[in-house]
Image (spheres, helix red, strand yellow):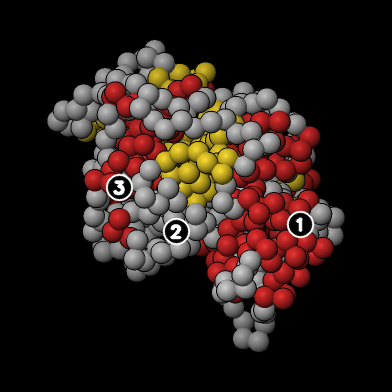
Amino acid sequence: MTGKCFLKSAQPGVLLGAALLGLAVMGSGNAAPPAVVRVDSGELRGVVEDGVAAYKGIPFAAPPVGELRWRPTQPAAPWSGVRPAAEYGADCMQGRFGPPPAPGACGRAPSEDCLFVNVWRPASAARGAKLPVMVWIHGGGFVGGSSSSPNTSGAQFAKQGVVLVAANYRLGRFGFFAFPALGRERPDETKGNYAYMDQIAALQWVQRNIAAFGGNPNNVTIFGFSAGGVSVHSLLASPMARGLFHKAIAESGGSRDSVLTARPMREDGVDPNYPVSAETIGVQFARSMGIEGTDQAALARLRGLSAEEVLRGAPAQPGVSVPRQELTPILDGKLITETAETAYKAGRQARVPLMAGSNSADTAGNRIVAATKERFFARFGQWSAQAKEAYDPDGSTELATMISRANDDFGQAEPARFAVSAFAAKGLPAYRYRFSYVQSAMRERMRAGAPHGGEIGFVFGTLAARAGSTVSPEDQAVSRMAQSYWVHFAKTGDPNGAGLPAWPRHDPGKDLIFEFRPDGTAGAGPDARKLRLDVMQRATEAGKRADF
């Protein structure tokens, strides 16, 4: 999040044992200058702490400012000498949350000049070590987030022999924007999905440079949460991302149409999920800023707006209601040629192993609303009786609980099952999970279960990064186990390893799911949500999704 200070990259947290992971844990030591690393733009010097070398704030592209606003990602300018890489670069432009930081307490404020990548590697890893590479895509609804959050420091992954990469990407109107004059300008360029262009540019940077950090460019795993998980699914379906990664993990990333998926570029009314086209939204924004017309002069005025004006839009006017349009990926015809759901149904996704899942209380939106139980069940159309059996079998479930569970199933749990089933149907390794464990100190506040994003601190081994957080031995054990599965998957395409409970490949013909259980154990068993997911799938496949 912006407006909050970031801790050092080597967070205190949970360490994994070498025996459990089957990997050599790199030795620790006092802070010392690492060897200089040369990337294609110049030389870098990071910092070493506790056996991890961190290189932060590396430009992987040119600043997308001025005439480069709403242009495809451009190459970074080379530099001379050795560039310090000890501090994070700026976050991309986004809204600020919470009180302002104390003067001098934090790093740089959000900026359009934000296309930076951070790399963590074992300090002892030499060029040519060919370690597995994991590329993290942060969440934030495509309007917020950062590659430099303390909760997603790559230090603990590096201690397990992984090279961890995290990159920023343009957000909000900077990341997804269409306007008629843009379509006519440089017609051969890809348009609209500037956030995804940045993600692809970062993956291309990894292919060119990661060997210098000891990583293997032929063993790259992309993984992301929420909007980052949506990005994973989009990259799996995009022809422009083929060959840039070899495994994928989607954490609470949906996969079905309508939840942060692709909006038509032009014609209004062609998609029931997105009846307003991306270009129409762009024209509406221009008019709200006093910019009429759709020609190059209008585009020049849009590019002349300050970053704050693009971010905030026009000030609210008394008595004037401006409809809010969700800023989503765009069907541009080159980078995004179809949605992930369409690609998966047709078997056109990248042929790589997939791990996907969600959390036990993973409600990140409020698409399903109802004033009464009868209206709730009616949303499932001809399957209203099955919905009652699944969500309120004895009539005692509170309406608010039913709505929360249905939103979880609609946005996360059922789409995760759909995605892994589509991969498994093509003979690809696929693994589904549900994360139900809640950190000990937070159980009174999170009685419903693990919330959206609740797995991140466990996966990254950064539970102690939360201010005032108490980490119990049970929490540590669950974190060791979770990160072990993620690292094994990145290494081999199979999360299983010595000393870990068996995680079977997904079989669409069975109702098994691998669960990180509330009591700290883990294992595969029948999915207790099967009835709920089945009725949600029926309503979805029947075209009821947009009605929700």
x 35%, y 27%: residue: 499
Q: Amino acid at mark 2?
A: Gly
How many marks the image carries: the answer is: 3
Query: How far apart are labels 3 and 2 at the CA level?
Result: 15 Å
**Front-lying residue, 39 or 245:** 245
Amino acid on which the number 1 mark rests in the picture:
Ala
Residue bearing the label numbered 3: 475
SS at circle 3: helix
Other residues around mark 2 within 10 Å, as few (<14) / some (14–19) / many (≥20): some
Question: Quadrant location of the N terminus?
Answer: bottom left
Q: Quadrant of residue 165?
A: top left
Residue 169 position (above or below residue 259):
above
Q: Quadrant of residue 268?
A: bottom right
Q: Are marks 3 and 2 in contact (CB under 8 Å)?
A: no
Question: Which residue matches tag 2?
Answer: 449
In the image, 75: left or right of 189? left
Pointer 1 with pointer 3, Cβ within 8 A:
no
Residue beneath label 1, please?
539
Residue 512: tell me if it is visible: yes
Q: Is residue 340 left or right of residue 107?
A: right
Mark 2 and mark 1 residues within 8 Å of each other at the beta carbon: no
Q: Position of residue 141 (x, y in %)?
A: 55, 55
Spatial CA distance of label 1 from label 3 is 38 Å
Q: Residue at x 68, y 25 (%)?
A: 427
